[in-house]
Amino acid sequence: MDTQPFLVGASLTAIPKKGGGVRRIACGETIRRLVSKLAARHACEVVGHIFAGTQFGVDATMGAERVIHRCRTFFNDQNQSPVLKIDFSNAFNNISRETVLEVVATHVPAILPWVSFTLVQASRLTLADSSYILSQQGVQQGDPLGSVLFALAISPMVRRINDIPGIKLNLWYLDDGAIGGQTESLSKAFELLKSDGPTMGLFVNEKKCEFIRHSNSPQTIEGPSGVPVITDNWSMLGAPIGDVQFSSAFVDKAVLQKVRDLADKCLRLEDPQVCFSLLRKCIAYSHGVSVARACSPRFIDSVLREMDLVVRRTFETFVGFTPTELQWRQVTMSTAKGGMGLRSSHVHGPVSYFSSVVACSKLDNWDPRVAQDFHDVLSCVRQLSRQPQLSEDTSASACSQRTLSGVIDELQFEDLLKDSSEVHCARLRSCSTGGVASAWLTAVPSPHNGCAIQPACFKTAVQLYLGANVCTAGPCPLCPNPMDSLGYHANTCKGNYSLSRRHDALRDVFQAFCSMGHLAPKKEPVIPTQQLDRDTMTYYEANTRSDILLLCTGSSPFAVDFAVTSPLQPSFVSGAAKVAGFAAERYSLKVKEDKYDAQFKALGLVFKPIVFETFGTVCSKGRELINFVARHVANSRSISMSTAVQRINGQLSCCLMRFNALSVLERMQRMECV
């Protein structure tokens, strides 16, 4: 049986288009995708120079942004030069396979056998109901090699446009083109596309093309026949180019309405952890920053502010409480700085635009100062980052969004510390160490990977993390000590075996990863030691149980001991308010290492304490051990070291927060029943 229709076939998914109709996305077999990725990489290495300067949809860093900025700069600077936007009808599915094979044979013959195998015969595109249609023409959207083949096929036609006198702009993002210059030149370019396109299966969609002219240009200027004429205000690749009113309305319709719709759908979910994960990764900052990088903040500031309000209202709804202004400031910081990652699109908007303009200008060798509102945005970024020396000549890394947004996060964190009490400073610093402290916020919320947190526990964990009042002051129902509103007592109370259950759960999570890394873990082995009787100050023989004994470490066995302490503990809070991880380090040294290190060493064992703070910070020796185990897990599972660390941190973090929240909920339920 011929396997080609099946091997190069794909499952077909229909994605709705904005203007109606569907976009067919093919998801091919794994083997086909892997080979196509290698072929695409080789093709870009060989023919990348063909795409340079005109085609930004293939092998181009920040391709869409580069097209948008150059189109806007050209249109704003060349006051009398119109722009012609090109749209082909169903381009990917109509491109001639003969043309594709011809250009591949000419430019990249090394991949011709694979391309021929995938295209010379019809393949099966399977629909959701298991029926199928045959793919007999075009290249598949979703195929890693599809974009490269399409761009390579149209490249001769695109290059011929550059040869037309009077053409000053010729930019393409796959099948979306923007051509600028004299009116007569644009008409010639349009006729070239209409004449050459059909020979390769491409047909210009005149109704969706646009001829954009300036309002101060003669009204007699007309574009190609049948092409709509637009004045001043237009869009390119989803970004507005025009005046404030148009840009604001465009982003409101294209982005803000989508954010509102997604937020409403998100709230229909019954799981607040899933809702938060979607809000953080897919709705909040991701939509705001994408449009902010392509458009001056002056044009979209009001929309970005409204977007932040939508995010805040959504967050308040699914967590079930209204954060104070200080707490909301923590929410909007990055998780690396103790926040919850719901960054403000309005605050980071100027940084997004500035970093995009500078990066694109360096890539395409144009002066960033000609970009729209560049000097005003530069002044705003200098103020936000408190870097008066910042300029367009600053190194690319220092102007990157990651760097500048990180600076803003650091400044916000320091300002928040100044406005917070000592107790809350200790909490904030404990939340800001990354790793286990923030992993519960970034982990995929799935029970299959051990990172799911029950709805009531997640809501309570969020309130604990933000320093909200989670408990009612009064006597603890499980011990004689009083409860406090911040949950400190609930997370340090031994009643109902809360501490033991949390301790054992953390130990079991870590032991599972030790087994995964083939470290031969043994749970709670009896180890003879000498203990100090503090009443008589004499030593006595005792049997000590290490939480986990790792036998296969490549050296001496590791005796691993778990503990959880709180940075809000009176003896720690002052130091914890000044130094992140103070409580974990002191507990590790004074309570664990001073007591066991020498004794275990005498027995030929290496003592390894893992001390957590209740907000997730881990002592330095604990972090070293996590990395050690992660390295063995990575080797045994053939995954990257960073992935292994991420998985271990995620499960430990979710486990810790889950039991912290349970301790609070159990006590509050008992208090309500009294």
Image (spheres, helix red, strand yellow):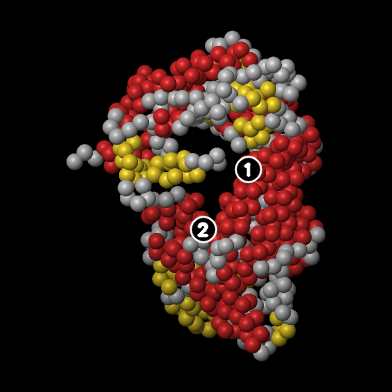
CB under 8 Å between callouts 2 and 1?
no
Q: Residue 123 placed where, x, y %?
A: 30, 37
Identify the residue under disc 1.
254
| Viewer can see residue 142 | yes
Q: Quadrant of the C terminus?
A: bottom right
Q: Residues within 10 Å of mark 2 (few under 14, many from 20)?
A: some
Question: Which of the 4 image quadrants contains residue 300?
Answer: top right
Q: Earlier in the sequence, mark 2 or mark 1?
A: 1
Q: How far, Cα to Cα, is label 2 from label 1?
A: 28 Å
| Viewer can see residue 404 | no
Seen at 73% across and 84% down, the residue is 474
| Residue type (three-letter) at the residue carrying disc 1 | Ala
Q: Is residue 566 above or below residue 237?
A: below
Q: Is residue 116 above or below residue 547?
A: above
Identify the residue under disc 2.
444
Please give left or right for residue 117 compared with residue 415 in the image: left
Question: Which of the 4 image quadrants contains residue 586?
Answer: bottom right
In the image, 239 versus 496, the foreground residue is: 239
Q: Residue 481 placed where, x, y %?
A: 69, 85
Seen at 73% across and 49% down, the residue is 305
Asked which secondary structure carries label 1, the reply is helix
Question: Which of the 4 image quadrants contains residue 632?
Answer: bottom left
Q: Residue 495 placed where, x, y %?
A: 60, 84
In the image, 351 versus 418, the foreground residue is: 351
| Residue type (three-letter) at the residue carrying disc 2 | Val
In the image, 274 versus 565, the foreground residue is: 274
Question: Which residue is outermost to the bottom?
Answer: 674
Asked which secondary structure carries label 2, the reply is loop
Which is closer to the viewer, label 2 or label 1? 1
